[in-house]
Amino acid sequence: YTYLAGDHGSRVFTVTLKTIGSQTVTFASTGLASANATITVEAAAASALMFTQQPSTSPSGVALLSQPRVAIRDAFGNVVPTAGATVTLTLVAPTSGSGALSGCTSSVSGGIATFSGCHVTGTGIGFKLTATDTTGGGGGHPYAAATSATFDIPDNLGFQTQPGGGPGAANRAQGGIA
């Protein structure tokens, strides 16, 4: 902005800061000393859920090796540490296979729902989880749902390494019984 004589050395600016935390705004003009202002930006109103840790491929019936974490975020993607809710995960049908989800409800603390013991029984390729605010109506609830990245639950059959360390010879498994 270039000051005009009619500004009388004063101008009002509107600035939208979207990232929470301490922010510094610098005012500078050619030939004048610059001035800084430090502003603490708070999160906007809570509006939606987002996965901050995705579920991972895991064996059937075993707790997911990477347990999901779901945050309550504002319109700018910031975690809202003062927001509370109960978050429930549901299983989205895989592209092939089937399964059932267990152990996947958590209360939010500090804006984050942390899960432990969440597991899928069954097998399939391309599972996803949907995170839903199950707190109930009122006070901004329910927040918009979120969907995870895809993950697989393998059938747990087959050998990753052959017994005895190799294919053997003469129709015998190496180190195995004839």
Image (cartoon, rainbow, N blue to C red):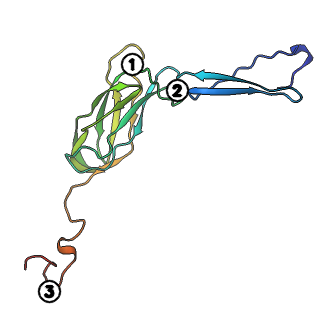
Query: Which amino acid, by three-letter code, is at mark 2?
Result: Ala
- In the rendered view, does 62 fall on the left or right side of 95? left
Outermost left residue: 178
* Label 3 close to label 2 by CB (< 8 Å): no
Q: Quadrant of residue 87?
A: top left
- Quadrant in the picture for the N terminus: top right
Badge number at residue 74: none
- In the rendered view, does 124 fall on the left or right side of 81? left
The image position of residue 137, as x and y in percent, is 35, 15
Disc 1 to disc 3, how far (Cα)? 68 Å
**Secondary structure state at the residue bearing disc 3:** loop
**Secondary structure state at the residue bearing disc 2:** loop
Outermost right residue: 5
The image position of residue 49, as x and y in percent, is 41, 29
Q: Quadrant of residue 169?
A: bottom left
Q: Which residue is mark 2?
A: 75
The image position of residue 170, as x and y in percent, is 14, 86
Q: Nearer the viewer, residue 112 or 46?
A: 112
Disc 3 to disc 2, how far (Cα)? 67 Å
Crowd rating for badge 1 (residues with CA inside 10 Å; few <14, some 14–19, many 20+): some
Crowd rating for badge 3 (residues with CA inside 10 Å; few <14, some 14–19, many 20+): few
Q: Nearer the viewer, residue 27 or 89?
A: 27
Query: Which amino acid, by three-letter code, is at mark 3?
Result: Ala
Crowd rating for badge 2 (residues with CA inside 10 Å; few <14, some 14–19, many 20+): few
Question: Residue placed at 21% from the left, 46% from the top?
Answer: 62
Q: Which residue is mark 1?
A: 141
Q: Return the disc, 2 or 1, that comes first in the chain's sequence.
A: 2
Question: Residue placed at 27% from the left, 37% from the top?
Answer: 116
Q: Which residue is mark 3?
A: 170
Query: Which amino acid, by three-letter code, is at mark 1?
Result: His
The image position of residue 56, as x and y in percent, is 33, 47
